[in-house]
Amino acid sequence: MIASVNGRVAAVSPDGAVVEVGGVGLAVQCTPGTIARLQVGESARLATSLVVREDSLTLYGFADDDERQLFELLQTANGVGPRLAQAVLAIHPPREVRRAVSMADVKALMQVPGIGKKGAERLILELRDRLGVTSTDTQLDGAAPAGLPAVTPVAPWRDQLASALVGLGWTGKEADAAIGQLAPLADEQVTSTGSVEVAVLLRQALRLLGRP
């Protein structure tokens, strides 16, 4: 198993990145929130999970070890594969996934594309006693717990979003224009949740800039 990769970020795309390790470029599938923390040319560490299929080897990357462990645990539920597990983490951070499962919040889980009411209820039933609670559940700022290094130190959302957009090929001016339009949405997130979900803002920015 490839538990982590540490190297220079060679490229980023809407659904992943290429990290150079020992002269080899590894393609890693990542959530928007993780991609937003990566910058081309900079070093990064990603916790990873290798999914082996008869016709493919797919490496999934995460901001920290806790997120990777949750990704793997989600797949133990009936009907949940790696794509759906990654989609869950693209919509909700680990602490919110645990909260939704422990509190039987069906509506929150149904926000994930591909999960309907029955699927959400099944997730709750199968994982309620297994997800557990870690120190990340008490951290409202989304920082990694002590001893689990994140991809990069979490910067203000504007810096994270600008870096992600420039890394995906847009100019600084285009990134700034999109960020200006998204500022009211970010303010609403802070008011309602106390934090900003960069993954949500990145998806909105891509739509504004013409990439679905």
Image (cartoon, rainbow, N blue to C red):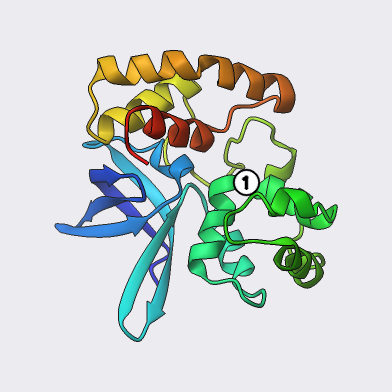
In this picture, is 2 found above or below 10? below
Q: Is residue 152 visible?
A: yes
Q: Is residue 153 visible?
A: no
Residue at figure coordinates x 30%, y 83% from the top left: 55
Position of the C terminus, as image quadrant, is: top left
Point out residue 158 in the picture as x, y percentages from the top left corner: 45, 20
Residue at figure coordinates x 27%, y 28% from the top left: 166
Badge 1: residue crowd in 10 Å (few <14, some 14–19, many ≥20): many
Point out residue 22 in the picture as x, y percentages from the top left corner: 18, 58
Point out residue 19 in the picture as x, y percentages from the top left corner: 26, 51
Q: Is residue 169 left or right of residue 52?
A: left
Q: Is residue 89 left or right of residue 37?
A: right
Residue at figure coordinates x 64%, y 25% from the top left: 189
Q: Residue furthest right?
A: 103
The local secondary structure at tag 1 comes to loop
Q: Amino acid at mark 1?
A: His
Q: Which residue is mark 1?
A: 92
Position of the N terminus, as image quadrant, is: bottom left
Q: Is residue 187 left or right of residue 169?
A: right
Point out residue 78 in the picture as x, y percentages from the top left corner: 66, 78
Residue at figure coordinates x 39%, y 20% from the top left: 178
Quadrant hosting residue 144: top right
